[in-house]
Image (cartoon, helix red, strand yellow):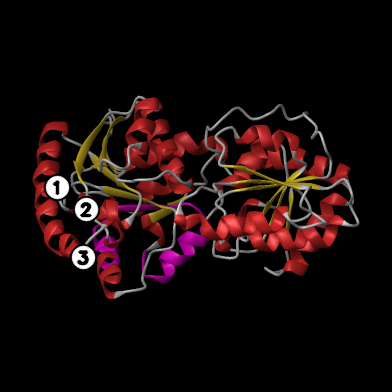
Amino acid sequence: MTQTPRILAMIGSRLIYGQERANLLVMETLKAQGCEILAVVEDHPSFRIMPQELEKRGIPYVEAPAIGRRADGYLLDFIVGNPVRYLRLRKQLRAVVREFQPTHIHVPNPFAFLMADAVAQPELPIIYRIGDEPPMHNAVKRWIWRRIARRVTHFVADSEFIAQRLISLGIERERMCVIFTPPAKRSKPPQPHHAPSNPQHVLFLGQLTPNKGIDLLLEAFQQVATDFPQARLTVVGRISDWSGDDWQRRLRDKTLLDSEIGERVSFVGEQENIYRYLASAAFLVVPSVWEEPFGLVVGEAKAAARPSVVFPRGGLPEQIMHGEDGFICRDTSIEALVEGLRYYLSEPERAREHGRKALASMTRLGIDQFAQRWRALFDATTSSTGLSSRNSRETEEVQ
């Protein structure tokens, strides 16, 4: 009889973005599959979002001392305070392990791995869901990654793009699998037959940062606006009074003052009910100029039966069959993005047809097998020695 997995999940996150939502979904899914979950989060008074999200899902958690970042405050506290906090963290986690008796440790990032590493129990399998490229830009991060590569039992990559990056860093293929993440359960998708209120309504959904390409989209939209008088663009993403959002505020203010498109672009801020906006849009645009590891918003658009126009970056092209359920731009230029906008603005019926195919494509991507594959992975790695000492045939069912 298969032992019920008892998973100590080193969440440890302060804010909730795409990767954090995906990891919460993994924990929620495994809980529904009968696994016992205990999450570890940072005890930081300024960041209470993660505990609130865990409580919503009925996932128990413990709080551990937060390790300070350079951005948190004074350098002296960073240098002197962190070793003390680390020793407290190590002591507390060992007590948690003794009491909870986990069969696995789940980590989603290098910082969470360091929390797990503090437990120092090599017989516990560590499952690393990796949704970003491994950080290798300084000596400390390279050292952490080398330890991750030696210690982690099995990697779950968010896309084939991430899997190939792991292979380039020397991780064996038999120690990894690719499991695409389904749309986050932020709200209920519209009915598949629901037609957009405006067949020339364009949607952007995500962080308003330069690497997400929102500035390129606004320029491309300006170039097509004259030819499509009914075209509208809605931008969903945070713009706050925080000093870190200065670039976003300037971009918004400049756009709204533009005589050509100012009245045709709506900045609605960060929204929980994203499907409200997907229901009214004809298609989504994801113009990321960085190597987007996966792009959860494409899956959210598919669930709403909406096609996506994407840049050929990272794992984005893996989700789309070009000219069937979406449009993959030839490069990351404004000119290529203009082509993508025209592709659907000029033929609204094409957008509706591709939207229907986008919804159907979720089966091709294995989204419907998400829960079963995660549970199978934990069942296959329930061992005192972990998967790394087993024959790789035991993980064939999750490949």
- Residue in view at x 21 percent, y 65 percent: 75
Of the residues shown, which amino acid type is indicated by label 3?
Answer: Leu
Q: Do callouts 1 and 2 mark residues in contact (Cβ within 8 Å)?
A: yes
Residue 77 visible in the snapshot: yes
Compared to residue 75, the image places residue 257 above or below, namely: above
State left or right for residue 109 relative to residue 285.
Answer: left
Q: Which residues are magenta?
A: 145-171
The residue identified by callout 2 is: 67
Residue 267: x and y in percent read 65, 46
Q: Secondary structure at mark 1?
A: helix
Look at the image and tell me in which quarter the N terminus lies: top left
Pick the residue in front: 106 or 52: 52
The residue depicted at 32 percent of the width and 74 percent of the height is 138
**Which percent across, then down, holds residue 188?**
60, 27
Residue at the spot of label 3: 75
CA–CA distance between discs 1 and 2?
9 Å
Count neighbours of disc 1 (C-alpha within 10 A) and say few if under 14, some if 14 to 19, many if 20 or more. Answer: many
